[in-house]
Image (tube, rainbow, N blue to C red):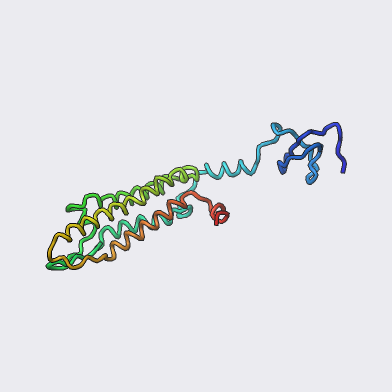
Amino acid sequence: MHQPSNNVIAIGFCPFCRESFENLALCPEHELPLVEWHELPPDPFSQNILESETEVLSFGFSYGRAWLCAGALCLLVGFFLDAFSVTLSRVASPSAFELANTKAFNLWTIPLCSFVVFAICYRRRTLVRMQSARAALLLVALMPMVSLIFTFLGVRRWLGSQRDFSLLEPRGGLFLLGLGIISMVVGALRFGVPRRSRHIHE
């Protein structure tokens, strides 16, 4: 292969494949003159990645939005359904909404977190901004779980002091709330992650 001696560089880089070679003038594969590191042109692949990450995307249900929106919707619906049943002198089946209107004011975090998730999904339109919100979304997704556990333990303590306590059972609303939390956690971890990156990690 022809290698002009007057253009030999100790360590040269191919401007196409960007591979390094020692004591050669041409790239063995592409037969292009090697250049020094500071003479390399911008990497078009890296440039394309940067442009795709900062590109403003239209609203849709990709990049984890479907999981987040479905989870937030489950929280809103489950908030108004019966959360559990209590059997004392009679059977009562309060919803999280009813409990939030009486003593468990912390349960208002459930609809609040739902609206926050919807707002983030709508306003974050670039991959960079989506990825920067993942930690916040994960925290928002877990807040309803903390409120539910705190309220459920409080109800159990109160019922434990009642002589006629016999049964405390979860109902459909509580299961739907749990499903919504799980869905939002999954969505928070996938938010802004391109499909190609997911396949590589999987």
Compared with residue 80, is residue 27 higher up or lower down, i.e. above or below? above
76, 176: nearer the viewer: 176
Q: Quadrant of the C terminus?
A: bottom right
> As rendered, which of 164 and 115 lies closer to the eye?
164
Image label count: 0
> Is 61 above or below relative to 26?
below
Q: Is residue 40 left or right of residue 56?
A: right
Q: Position of residue 59 (x, y in %)?
A: 45, 50
Judging depth in this view, the residue of 141 and 165 nearest the camera is 165
Report which quarter residue 37 is drawn in: top right
Describe residue 80's horizontal placement relative to residue 182 as left or right: left
Picture coordinates of residue 51 (x, y %)? Answer: 57, 42
Quarter holding the N terminus is top right
**Residue 3 in the image: x percent, y percent?**
86, 39
Which of these two is toward me, 192 or 22? 22
Q: Position of residue 187 (x, y in %)?
A: 43, 54
> Residue at the location (45% across, 51% down)?
189
**Which residue appears at 58% of the width and 44% of the height?**
49
Residue in view at x 21 percent, y 59 percent = 156
